[in-house]
Image: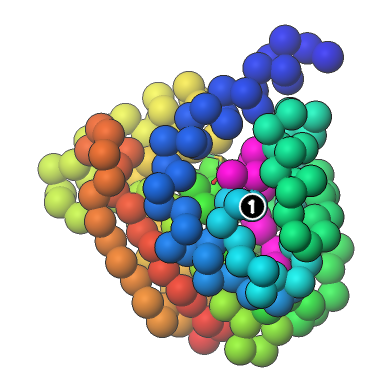
């Protein structure tokens, strides 16, 4: 195994722990058959309620083998299927299979988020919900301008993350109707701290 492949999930797990206080509010609303986009190191797993019947988790760079992730999977009170897949490709799931699709801090990283959202609409059951918690474009123009300036460098440094995506507009452009949306400032640098938390249905 290359050092970078060993290091990546460990670093990601450490970094994403900083956002754990925000997870229960959104992950706790999942139910039934659930699809999670950008599963990462499985940090949402402990917050998914027993109403979840089964989780299908996709990520093009799964952190399989990371002890903390394997422990989270082993402790889940429902089956967890893991797939090394990107969300903006063709998903091998039947139309209408899922009651909930969950995405946390992942719409920033998907190269073609509109394509991913179209696939999400296809695999969601009628009445199913998209639950999202994402960082993105700030409401104040000054910070948003800094986000636009810094994004090319940030994208190159992280290899995947965009700091300036307007998540609410993206979700709507992907064919969803927002049922709930909360925008708030979390801790950390202003360009990374603007959060979008919401629930959406197919429009
Ligand atoms: C910042 S991490 C967030 C991980 C996790 N969702 C969390 O909340 O801790 C972004 C994740 O998106 C994944 N990702 C990148 N491109 C993707 C794509 N095209 N489809 C799905 N996931 C992708 C990355 O591999 C990474 O695990």
Relative side of 100 to 185, left or right: right
Element assignment for label 1: helix
Name the residue nearer the viewer: 27 or 72.
72
Image spot of residue 33 (x, y percent): 74, 73
Number of callouts = 1
Colouring chosen for the image of the structure: rainbow
Name the residue nearer the viewer: 139 or 74.
74
Q: In the image, is residue 160 above or below residue 4?
A: below
- Seen at 27% across and 46% down, the residue is 186
- The answer to if 39 sits in the magenta stretch is yes
Q: Name the residue under label 1.
A: 45
Image spot of residue 157 (x, y percent): 48, 22
- The image quadrant that residue 143 belongs to is top left
Name of the residue lying farthest toward the top: 3
In which quadrant of the rendered image does the N terminus lie?
top right
Image spot of residue 116 (x, y percent): 64, 60
- The image quadrant that residue 52 belongs to is bottom right
Residue 17 visible in rendering: yes
Name the residue nearer the viewer: 202 or 33.
33
Q: Residues within 10 Å of mark 1 (few under 14, many from 20)?
A: many
Relative side of 21 to 150, left or right: right
- The image quadrant that residue 118 belongs to is bottom right
- The answer to if 200 sits in the magenta stretch is no
Which range is magenta? 34-43
Magenta: main secondary structure: loop
Q: In the image, is residue 47 above or below residue 155?
A: below
- Seen at 41% across and 28% down, the residue is 154
Q: In which quarter of the image is ligand 1?
A: top right
- Seen at 84% across and 75% down, the residue is 94
């Amino acid at each position: 195994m290359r050092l970078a492949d060993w290091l990546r999930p460990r670093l990601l797990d450490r970094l994403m722990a900083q956002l754990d206080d925000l997870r229960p509010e959104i992950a706790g609303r999942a139910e039934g058959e659930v699809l999670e986009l950008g599963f990462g190191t499985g940090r949402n797993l402990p917050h998914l309620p027993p109403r979840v019947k089964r989780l299908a988790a996709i990520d093009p760079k799964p952190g399989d083998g990371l002890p903390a992730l394997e422990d989270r999977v082993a402790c889940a009170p429902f089956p967890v299927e893991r797939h090394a897949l990107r969300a903006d490709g063709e998903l091998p799931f039947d139309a209408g299979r899922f009651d909930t699709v969950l995405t946390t801090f992942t719409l920033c990283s998907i190269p073609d988020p509109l394509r991913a959202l179209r696939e999400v609409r296809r695999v969601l059951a009628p009445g199913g919900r998209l639950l999202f918690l994402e960082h993105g474009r700030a409401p104040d123009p000054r910070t948003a301008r800094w986000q636009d300036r810094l994004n090319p460098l940030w994208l190159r440094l992280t290899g995947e993350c965009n700091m300036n995506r307007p998540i609410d507009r993206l979700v709507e452009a992907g064919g969803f109707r927002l049922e709930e949306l909360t925008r708030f400032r979390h801790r950390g640098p202003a360009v990374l701290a603007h959060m979008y938390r919401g629930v959406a249905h197919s429009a």
